[in-house]
Amino acid sequence: MQDYELSILEQYPIIVKSTRKTRGAFFCDTDQGFLLLREAGMSKRRILAVQKLCSHLEEEGYARTDQLIPNQTGEYVSTSEEGRNYILKRWFRGRECDIRKGKELLEGTANLAHLHRFMTEIPEGENAAKCSIRDEYARHNQQLKKIRKFMRNQSPLGEFEMEFLKCFDRIFQWAEAAFEEAQDMPCDRLFQECREKGMMIHGDYNYHNILMTDDGIATTNFDRSGYHIQAEDVYYFLRKAMEKQGWNIRAGGHMLDAYDAIRPLTREEEGYLKLRLIYPEKFWKLADSYYRSNKAWISVKNVEKLKTAIRQIEEKRQFLETVFAFRLS
């Protein structure tokens, strides 16, 4: 560990036994247990909001989260001599959830349902959803058409542009279908109801943030938490898992059953989940990334990502037909 990182740890009332580097952070074995030091990456106001949520979860009985450790002056943010802000968090000895294993996938899903039951009736603070999904999809669809027009005017076309234009009409049908579906759904009312009930989401619930330990599952990194429809977390975790499993209908159905057994989705939430799954989000994100990038050179990796996104949309078709009775007209 570098001297400046050691100086950060000196600001805490702990005795450090050893440290080792991990992805963008440092594991610290201390007299206060296993901790993790990393750059804050958030405003101090946001850090306080995250800590408030984790404290609420612990008070309500969900204790296995990465609580922040205050320094010797009682602050959650410590600044190095170079002016960098750091946070120190309680951490857990374990490994990331392996969503390719059916048992762990269902355990991770059940954990999300338990977590959501505790993430309710929280007095409203910052980071609440502010826009409707209809507006979001309208912007995305307009942007996709703009990007297509831009590509058509390029000469010569690269492999990324050719793949995008070749499949655009077929994929854009899904984007339009999602927008049309959103017209008949009370998404704005559902947003408002969730905010009134103080319902929050993790915001980044994926296998990286689900740690399997000897004492059970720990959930980490609530940096993107906020007031939202909790089916948003279900959508994100389900999509990530199904992309790894080729949109396996049986595995996806078991995930939804595992969640429903603990925290049943309402009819409106099921509709929201279906709506989110219909939209070709990965395709849009790759197009958006392309448009904002240096278009003179597109990496082979991005071309492969585009081909994968196109394939997965077709795999998702049968999943939506079977699980949600949705058929693209």
Image (tube, helix red, strand yellow):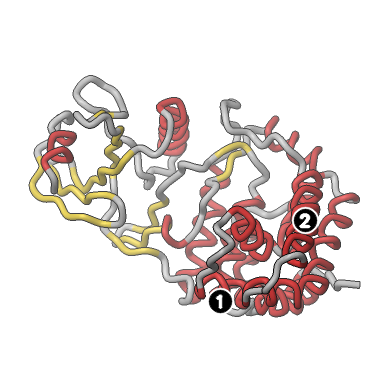
Cα–Cα span, label 1 and label 2: 22 Å
At 31% from the left and 29% from the top, the residue drawn is 77
Image quadrant assignment for residue 52: top left
- Please say if the residues under marks 1 and 2 sit with CB atoms less than 8 Å apart: no
234 up-or-down from 128: above or below: below
At 29% from the left and 48% from the top, the residue drawn is 91
Q: Is residue 316 left or right of residue 111?
A: right
Mark 1 closeness class: few <14, some 14–19, many ≥20 residues within 10 Å: few
Give the label on residue 304, or none.
1
Examine the rendering and report whether any part of residue 249 can be seen: no
Element at label 2 = helix
Measured as percent of width and height from the top left, residue 290 is found at: 61, 60
Q: Is residue 144 left or right of residue 286?
A: right
Residue sitting nearer the eye, 10 or 215: 10
Image quadrant assignment for residue 296: bottom right
* First reached walking from the N terminus: tag 1 or tag 2: 2
Measured as percent of width and height from the top left, residue 164 is found at: 70, 72
